Image: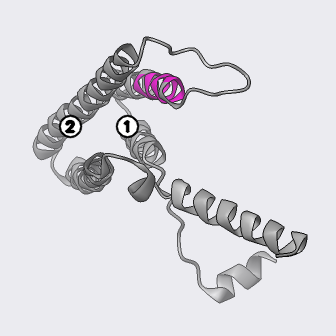
Amino acid sequence: MNTRSWLAMVALTAGVATIVSADPRKSSPDSNQYRNSVSVADSLNVTIDQWYDAALHDQGRAHGFEKQLLKSLQKDIDNTQGRIRQLRDQISSSGGQISSTDSVPNPLSDSLTRLSEIVRTKRALVDAITRTDALSNKYRLLGDYVGLIRREVGLPKLKLAVDKKSEADKN
């Protein structure tokens, strides 16, 4: 086997490994977490739509949906904190080494840091949602929360479909 063939095979193998590891459903040891987060994001979207419609037409129902939304958000934060506890347990059972060196990054430490930042952001969003009275602000903040959940599990951003005519008008 010549050098070019060998390098091509190594590059192909590395590329396939990168693609497989980029898919959160395949790289995550707990695919239930992926499915749960996707279903949380989807159910939040449905409840947000129901809340928004009720806020425009029936304030009583809107208040009920808002309570339901806040309960769902708190449950999601609690679930994320549970994952943080699990990571800490894994780190302590593996010798308590959570620091990473320049040459060998520690994926558990990186995950713990990332999840901690996500929890702080989720709490800040929930605090902002409860503080504001403006419907448009709440709607935007709830959309930000759902976007955060989508990024947490590696889902792509939602894109709106546009027709070719409006796309041509932009150019």
Q: Is residue 117 covered in magenta?
A: yes
Q: Residues within 10 Å of mark 2 (few under 14, many from 20)?
A: some
C-alpha span from label 1 to label 2: 15 Å
Image coords of residue 89 (percent x, y): 31, 18
Magenta stretch: helix, strand or loop mostly: helix
The residue positioned 39% from the left and 57% from the top of the image is 25
Query: Position of 134 compared to 14: left or right?
Result: left
Task: Please tell me which residue lies in front, 13 or 114.
Answer: 13
Helix, strand or loop under label 1 = helix
User: Residue at left 54%, top 66%?
Assistant: 159
Q: Residue 92 versus residue 125: which sits nearer the camera?
A: 92
* Disc assigned to residue 72: 2
Give the numbered dot on residue 111: none
Q: Residues within 10 Å of mark 1 (few under 14, many from 20)?
A: many
Q: Secondary structure at mark 2?
A: helix
Dot 1 amino acid type = Lys
| Tags 1 and 2 touching, CB below 8 Å | no
Q: Is residue 157 visible?
A: no
**Which amino acid type is shown beneath numbered disc 2?**
Ser
Compared with 166, 159 (above or below) is: above
Q: Residue at x 61, y 66 (%)?
A: 16
Q: Which residues are magenta?
A: 109-119
Establish if 58 lies above or below 169. above
Q: For mark 1, what is the residue?
A: 138
Considering depth in this image, is 72 or 15 the residue closer to the camera? 15
Tell me which label, 1 or 2, sits earlier in the chain.
2
Viewer can see residue 141? yes
Give coordinates of residue 162: x percent, y percent: 58, 78
Q: Position of residue 17 (x, y in %)?
A: 59, 59
